[in-house]
């Protein structure tokens, strides 16, 4: 398309229109297997912008692809036209009617955030997808989403009361319940809305048409039904049938995937909050057949949840840092687990329900273990199940669990036989498959494991989908239960509902959208399901050489390809976890883990340059990455963008040179060493408004920042002064790591650590060494690699002796477990280094647990402490160790601030162009929590950057946990 036309369009929009290569690349995919490069990406600000876009689309015969969170699995959000992302501006809760228990929202409201708002009113929106912490109401309506709670609370279509829409001609329309008389009134006039009512009446009042619909659509008992347009739902009212219900076009629009109209407001029916008492039985099975055999009997109980996970999913959880802890209830190596939740208003009723459920389970005798979970343990188990989709992306290599047949739903009584026949189909293709999800609703997410880079597997992709579609039709089931038709299943709609009904759907589409501009290629006139795939079939994939070792993912390209688009990185700061801080601050898709992985995949794959990293688009994509590593643990696919960024920076700078500022930050340790020789003068210069201001301006440091003071100290002499002979042989020898930050910037913390360990009876040895953190953060990988080799050599004896190495600065000591593993060849020594390296809190917590340290050594004074954990600690360790050690003094009241990244991230927050985002990140959770704390409350932060950020953002001094413990010692 002529770029001048796009420029003209951008000038009349109140929102934004982007058509640069980066924006198009990151919107070319969703969570499906498809890739279509859009013409542009629009961020409309209001309904008027949508009308402008519709005028443009109709005039230029170009498609508009509606999008919210972009987590669709069937390709609904990809297309060659203009992607219309309403997630940025259509984010308001418009009104709440507490009496009717109804809420009106814009389509960009996140489901879980809506429920946070509703909770104080005792209400919630029931449908609950696995993506609920980032999926948006617009997408849920478009897909008619269901999720884990549908057996109690129904599907999204059941909850939609009214919709304010913009039709394809730009006219406004409001859809809600209308009587037969009001229906007749709606037919009057020449508007597009009137034509819709007239034509629908003409089509659906025909008895033959009604017969075709009722005989060919899925069984009425199947609640999860999203095959094509829901014309069957339009027959259940007083206009077209004997039903007393009013007519409501929302039932058609729900599940229409943005192909019939743009929605600007949705009114939803709410439910009372679930009963407060809950218990979950997790039944374990040795075979899938046994697992499925138990579904029908347990569903005789009033279950709130009946979810299934198979061995493939459970095995994937073993390799995910965040989900590993949520496996606590898994007993042995089950072929499948059913998660059965009951709820009640009283403890007595809960016990009664639980007793009845257990008797049914015992009667069947098919499960070998039945642990019962309560409270927070239930949420952990649910999180494990919810992670299923993303975890499948964590399969190493090109063979992945592919979404194509994953949305089949059959009547509950047919489920076991259906799965039996499905398994035979898979066996015929010599295929493994994944089985998980909504067993109680008759829907399992079934996935074959295929390599869609190979033509042979693409043939299988179509063949398997076709065979399973036919099988589903044999059971009169729904081929699209909750994930929609999109591209992957739309081709099969004629098979599922018959050609006559399919022609009716085409007429419905043409009625609403005569020029076919609304999400073309979905539901009707579908794109081929085996074309426009994310990867070019049978192409020789490029070999991309890297300095970091990405062999754990079979190379950096496959490390980026692990991102399946599930969008966990789009959760806001209102949700648990820290991923992704830059997105949480900017709400820009460009600043997500997903976008960075997609951009890297796109430009590494499609580049003619010798250095494939030499792209300005990649520089832009990675610019706001804080290298917090939240993605390395919270992303179900373990996409480690911090490692990807380090490699990118190295290669990009090799091609384009290293800036003065990057060199200064990278070699900061050497500068600190020099400055510490005359620390008084250095610190005076840093604090001077004139000289310090000139220095900051010269190197591009934000003028608002305070430069850290440097110093020198003889830690060896200090150790000699405090070292005691070890009399308690149960106490360990330890190596205290004096890293570059402790050595020059945080001297007091190093002194406190020596005194603490010595007074507690440990035999302390010191190890001096620069970790390489500054080199890693700025992409100076050659220098980092050299340092790693040097430190490995210097630590050789320590590693061979098995002595624990204890560190104070998380970003330094935890690099031994993380980046060092990618920068050295001796995997045996690296394994020792990883297993012997500990945060000092980890070491102390293990010693407390072993009974070697007790509260008798500490004050019984009362103090209140709030902890902010370092990002790398959250990703590579845990915050509980800090919580545990600070709780050692008997009367210390300790809480963890539920903060994500502080926003400083080493040099990032000092750089003038990043200062604003840095402070925005800090202001999401951390700053408010600190500012609300009384002055006498101690703020604990073990990261040097975190302490500086807290000081700059709140004017409060934070202390390292070691310093707090040292002050609490009474021995």
Image (cartoon, grey):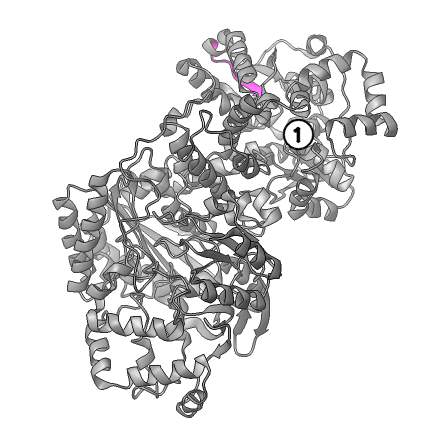
Q: Nearer the viewer, residue 478 or 741?
A: 478
Magenta range is 801-806
Q: Is residue 208 left or right of residue 741?
A: left
Residue ranking furthest to the bottom: 181
Instruction: Determine crowd level at label 1: few under 14, some 14-19, many 20+ residues with C-alpha closer than 10 A.
Output: some
Residue at 51% of width from left, 7% of height from top? Answer: 793
Residue 739 in picture, x, y percent from top left: 63, 18
Count of numbered marks: 1
State which quadrant residue 800 falls in: top left
Residue 871 in picture, x, y percent from top left: 58, 35
Q: Is residue 867 left or right of residue 238?
A: right
The answer to whether 568 is drawn above or below residue 512 in the figure is above
Residue 856 visible? The answer is: yes
The residue that disc 1 covers is 907
Q: Nearer the viewer, residue 300 or 742?
A: 742
State which quadrant residue 345 falls in: bottom left
Residue 820 in picture, x, y percent from top left: 49, 20
State which quadrant residue 323 falls in: top left
Q: Nearer the viewer, residue 19 or 719?
A: 19
Q: Is residue 190 magenta?
A: no
Q: Is residue 719 left or right of residue 130?
A: right
Q: Is residue 333 left or right of residue 263?
A: left
Q: Is residue 802 magenta?
A: yes
The answer to whether 127 is drawn above or below residue 545 in the figure is below
Residue 840 visible? The answer is: no
Residue at 51% of width from left, 57% of height from top? Answer: 85
**Which quadrant of the rendered structure holds the C terminus?**
top right
Indicate the secondary structure of the residue bearing disc 1.
loop
The answer to whether 254 is drawn above or below residue 363 in the figure is below
Residue 530 in picture, x, y percent from top left: 26, 49
């Amino acid at each position: 398309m002529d770029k001048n036309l796009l420029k003209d369009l951008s000038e009349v929009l109140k929102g934004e229109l982007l058509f640069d290569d980066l924006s198009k690349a990151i919107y070319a995919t969703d969570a499906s297997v498809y890739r279509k490069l859009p013409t542009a990406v629009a961020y409309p600000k209001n309904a008027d912008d949508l009308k402008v876009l519709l005028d443009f689309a109709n005039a230029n015969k170009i498609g508009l692809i509606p999008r919210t969170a972009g987590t669709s699995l069937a390709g609904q959000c990809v297309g060659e036209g203009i992607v219309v992302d309403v997630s940025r501006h259509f984010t308001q809760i418009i009104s709440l009617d507490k009496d009717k228990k109804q809420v009106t929202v814009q389509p960009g409201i996140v489901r879980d955030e809506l429920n946070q708002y509703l909770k104080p009113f005792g209400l919630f929106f029931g449908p609950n997808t696995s993506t609920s912490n980032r999926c948006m109401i617009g997408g849920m309506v478009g897909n008619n989403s269901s999720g884990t709670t549908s057996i109690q609370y129904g599907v999204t279509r059941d909850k939609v009361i009214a919709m304010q829409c913009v039709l394809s001609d730009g006219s406004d329309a409001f859809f809600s319940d209308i009587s037969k008389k009001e229906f007749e009134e709606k037919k009057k006039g020449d508007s597009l809305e009137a034509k819709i009512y007239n034509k629908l009446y003409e089509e659906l009042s025909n008895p033959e048409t009604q017969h075709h619909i009722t005989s060919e659509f899925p069984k009425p008992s199947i609640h999860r039904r999203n095959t094509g347009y829901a014309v069957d739902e339009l027959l259940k009212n007083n206009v077209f049938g004997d039903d007393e219900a009013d007519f409501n076009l929302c039932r058609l629009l729900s599940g229409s995937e943005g192909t019939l109209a743009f929605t600007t407001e949705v009114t939803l029916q709410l439910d009372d909050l679930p009963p407060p008492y809950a218990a979950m039985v997790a039944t374990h099975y040795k075979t899938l057949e046994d697992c499925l055999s138990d579904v029908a009997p347990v569903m005789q109980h009033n279950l709130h949840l009946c979810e299934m996970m198979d061995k493939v999913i459970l095995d994937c959880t073993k390799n995910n840092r965040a989900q590993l802890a949520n496996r606590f209830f898994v007993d042995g190596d089950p072929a499948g687990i059913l998660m059965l939740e009951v709820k009640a208003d009283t403890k007595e009723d809960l016990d009664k329900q639980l007793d009845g459920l257990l008797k049914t389970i015992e009667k069947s005798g098919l499960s070998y273990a039945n642990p019962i979970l309560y409270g927070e343990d239930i949420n952990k188990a649910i999180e494990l199940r919810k992670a299923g989709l993303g975890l499948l992306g964590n399969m190493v290599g090109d063979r992945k669990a592919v979404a194509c047949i994953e949305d089949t739903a059959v009547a509950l009584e047919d489920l076991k036989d259906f799965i039996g026949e499905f398994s035979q189909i898979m066996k015929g293709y010599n295929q493994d498959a994944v089985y998980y999800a909504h067993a109680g609703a008759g829907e399992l997410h079934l996935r074959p494991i295929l390599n869609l880079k190979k033509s042979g597997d693409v043939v299988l992709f179509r063949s398997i989908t076709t065979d399973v579609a036919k099988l589903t039709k044999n059971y009169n089931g729904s081929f699209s239960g909750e994930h929609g038709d999109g591209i992957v299943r739309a081709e099969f709609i004629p098979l599922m509902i018959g050609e006559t009904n399919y022609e009716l759907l085409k007429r419905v589409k043409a009625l609403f959208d005569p020029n076919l501009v609304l999400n073309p290629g979905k539901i009707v006139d579908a794109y081929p399901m085996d074309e426009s795939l994310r990867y070019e079939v049978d192409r020789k994939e490029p070999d991309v050489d890297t300095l970091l070792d990405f062999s754990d993912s079979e190379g950096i390209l496959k490390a980026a390809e692990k991102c399946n688009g599930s969008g966990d990185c789009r959760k806001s700061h209102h949700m648990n976890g820290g991923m992704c801080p830059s997105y949480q601050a900017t709400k820009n898709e460009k600043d997500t883990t997903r976008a960075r992985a997609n951009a890297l995949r796109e430009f590494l794959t499609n580049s003619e340059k010798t250095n494939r990293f030499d792209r300005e688009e990649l520089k832009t994509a990675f610019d706001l990455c804080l290298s917090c590593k939240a993605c390395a643990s919270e992303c179900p696919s373990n996409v480690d963008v911090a490692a990807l960024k380090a490699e990118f920076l190295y290669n990009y700078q090799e091609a384009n040179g290293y800036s003065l500022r990057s060199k200064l930050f990278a070699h900061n340790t050497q500068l600190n060493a020099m400055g510490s020789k005359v620390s008084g003068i250095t610190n005076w210069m840093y604090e001077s408004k004139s000289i310090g201001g000139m220095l900051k301006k010269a190197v591009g440091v934000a003028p608002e920042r305070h430069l850290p003071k440097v110093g020198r100290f003889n830690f060896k002499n200090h150790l000699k002064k405090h070292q005691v002979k070890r009399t308690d042989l149960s106490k360990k020898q330890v190596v205290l790591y004096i890293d570059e930050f402790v050595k020059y910037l945080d001297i007091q913390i190093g002194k406190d650590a020596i005194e603490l360990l010595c007074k507690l009876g440990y035999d302390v040895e010191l190890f001096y060494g620069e970790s390489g953190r500054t080199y890693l953060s700025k992409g100076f990988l050659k220098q980092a690699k050299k340092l790693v080799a040097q430190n490995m050599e210097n630590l050789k004896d320590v590693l061979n002796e098995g002595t624990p190495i204890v560190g104070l600065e998380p970003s330094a000591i935890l690099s031994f477990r993380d980046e060092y593993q990618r920068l050295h060849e001796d995997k045996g020594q690296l394994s020792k280094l990883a297993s012997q390296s500990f945060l000092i809190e980890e070491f102390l917590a293990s010693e407390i647990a072993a009974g070697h340290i007790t509260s008798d050594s500490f004050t019984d004074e009362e103090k209140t402490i709030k902890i902010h954990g370092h990002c790398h600690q959250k990703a590579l360790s845990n915050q509980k160790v800090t919580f545990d050690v600070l709780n050692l003094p008997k009367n210390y009241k300790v809480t963890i601030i539920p903060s994500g990244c502080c926003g400083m991230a080493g040099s990032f927050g000092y750089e003038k162009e990043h200062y604003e985002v840095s402070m925005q990140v800090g202001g999401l959770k951390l700053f408010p929590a600190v500012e609300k704390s009384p002055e006498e409350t101690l703020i604990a932060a073990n990261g040097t950057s975190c302490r500086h950020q807290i000081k700059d953002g709140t004017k409060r001094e934070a202390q390292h946990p070691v310093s707090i413990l040292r002050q609490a010692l009474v021995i």
